Image: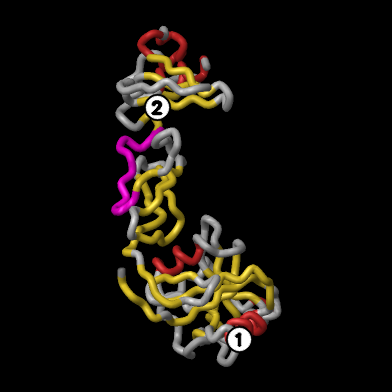
Amino acid sequence: MLNCVKECIMTSQCRGFNYRHDWLVCDLLGETTNIVSETGCIFSDIATWPKVMAGECRQHSCKNGERCIFNGQNQLCEKSYCIEAPVVKNAVSTERFGVYRNVGAGVKFKCDDGYNIIGWPYSVCLPSGEWENKFSCVVEETGTCPDEWILHNEHCYFFAWEELTWSQAKDNCKEKNSDLVKIEDENEELWIEGLMPDSKIWIGANDIENEGRWIWSSDNTTLQYFPWRSGQPDNYNNEEHCAQIFSDKDGGWNDIGCSERLSFTCERNAILYML
């Protein structure tokens, strides 16, 4: 709890804190009005504590969004939190304990009724002190998709857990009257990454027929959107002719040998009826 006191004194705008003793966690508070009692949580107003507990940072002039640190010789101010709460159109936060605004924090959201989510449902506080929304909410659609398929922007998607070679995955999609997914823009990619059954999957992009000419297996058109990872595609050992995408923090595409076994996503058109 004493660490909570120190952190609050060192952080600009901190007026008090909640100490959750079951979790050994403290929530720094920018305001102390409308406090509600909660089991397992102790509230403390920072004005009741001596500033000397923050050591060399007991008196500082750090700006809003910053905290004081002492490097052994001088006081320094570093970005510590986003000043305002994140705002996402047509969405509300689902955080049980309110919005955490410290750098690196992710605030979880859900879309309003009548909207579907595209991407990873979080807004993240960046080291710059700005929020980055990892998703958007779009008008909900309804239409005809087979069971276990997901409707999105007039297309149906099937996310397969089974790991197959690229050709086997393509054939599996064909059996479902579909093809390996064709990704046409960043929004579609973010939406897919948020639902991928594994950290990497097959997509329909390939240069099997003509090295260096990447096309989609669904319609043989050349790629117009192609966020390759740095240094990719590199056709390592002249054996990489099929594309995979990643859902990790770096994202992006990579060429890989078509005989590797990965999960995959199928895509087909849907008949839509707008709500």
Where residue 38 appears, as percent x and y from the top left, is: 46, 23
Q: Main secondary structure of the magenta part?
A: loop
Q: CA distance from mark 1 to mark 2?
A: 58 Å
Where residue 32 appears, as percent x and y from the top left, is: 33, 21
Q: Is residue 226 magenta?
A: no
Label 2 element class: strand
Residue 140, compared with residue 30, is above or below; it is below
Task: Locate residue 258 relative to residue 96 in the image: left or right.
Answer: right
Q: Which residue is mark 1?
A: 175
Amino acid tagged 2: Arg
Where residue 64 appears, as percent x and y from the top left, is: 30, 29
* Residue placed most toward the observer, 87 or 39: 39
Q: Residue at x 42, y 46 (%)?
A: 124
Label 1 element class: helix
Residue 207 appears in view: yes
Q: Which residue is mark 2?
A: 67
Q: Range of the magenta residues?
A: 79-91
Q: Residues within 10 Å of mark 1 (few under 14, many from 20)?
A: few
Q: Residues within 10 Å of mark 2 (few under 14, many from 20)?
A: many
Q: Is residue 89 magenta?
A: yes
Q: Residue at x 54, y 83 (%)?
A: 179
* Residue placed most toward the observer, 161 or 122: 161
Amino acid tagged 1: Glu
Q: Residue at x 61, y 71 (%)?
A: 160
